[in-house]
Amino acid sequence: MAQLESKVHEVIVTTLDHKRSPHSAPMGISEVNGHFLIKPFKPSQTYDNLKQHRQCSISYTDDVRVFAGSLTGRREWPTQPCQHIEGQYLKQALAHTELEIIAFDDDDPRACFTGALVTDVNHASFRGFNRAQSAVIEAAVLVSRLTMLPVEKIQQEIAYLSIAIEKTAGPREREAWGWLMTKINEAGIELDNE
């Protein structure tokens, strides 16, 4: 039977390390035939944690600071215990999914962990992203690939995304955007919108 892959969704995956401490990381995940595909790069903490502890949570949040913060050294976001697995989810999650890993392909440069749904829990209504929130998520993806993309591509994308920040950002989005721009500057990439 052919696999039908859905679109990639930007979420926060929370795993547990060998001391059972939570580690949250932004990641694009997809659903295929009722299962969740988690594809962390190797090496990474998420990869190591999932190899050791075959459970995790997916948090759905509209606080884009979590995405930006995870890529700029701000990983200490409050978590709460999951309901049906040994794990944690983000305290500010609008909803979360608890998964049991049922299959693992150790491909390079990204492994693929297949997760089976244990439970879905809704905590609050999702009102949708404004343009600035979407811009922060797109900029976070760029920051996660600073060593893989041409400098010109990063400069062009940031110039375009900064328009949404200027027009629709609130305090949380501006804070997250600032963290990401600092990271880009630290990588030696000059931006026109400064």
Image: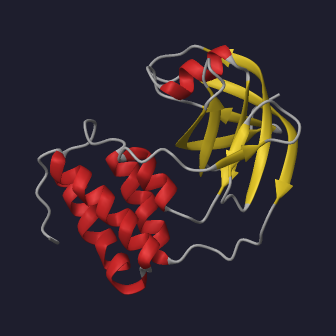
Q: Is residue 57 left or right of residue 148?
A: right
Identity of the residue drawn at 79% across and 30% down: 86
Indicate whether 170 appears above or below 151: below
Q: Tell whether 147 sits left or right of 72.
A: left
Report the side of 173 relative to 32 (left or right): left
Q: Quadrant of the C terminus?
A: bottom left
Whether residue 89 is visible to the viewer of this picture, yes or no, is yes
Residue at point 25%, 36% (across, down)? 147
Question: Measured along the vertical axis of the image, is residue 159 above or below residue 184?
Answer: below
Front-lying residue, 62 or 89: 89
**Image-quadrant location for residue 132:** bottom left
The x, y position of residue 191, in whole percent, is 14, 62
The residue lying toward the viewer, choosing from 76 and 57, is: 76
Q: In the picture shown, does residue 60 fall above or below 79?
A: below
Q: Quadrant of residue 68?
A: bottom left
* The N terminus sits in image quarter: top right
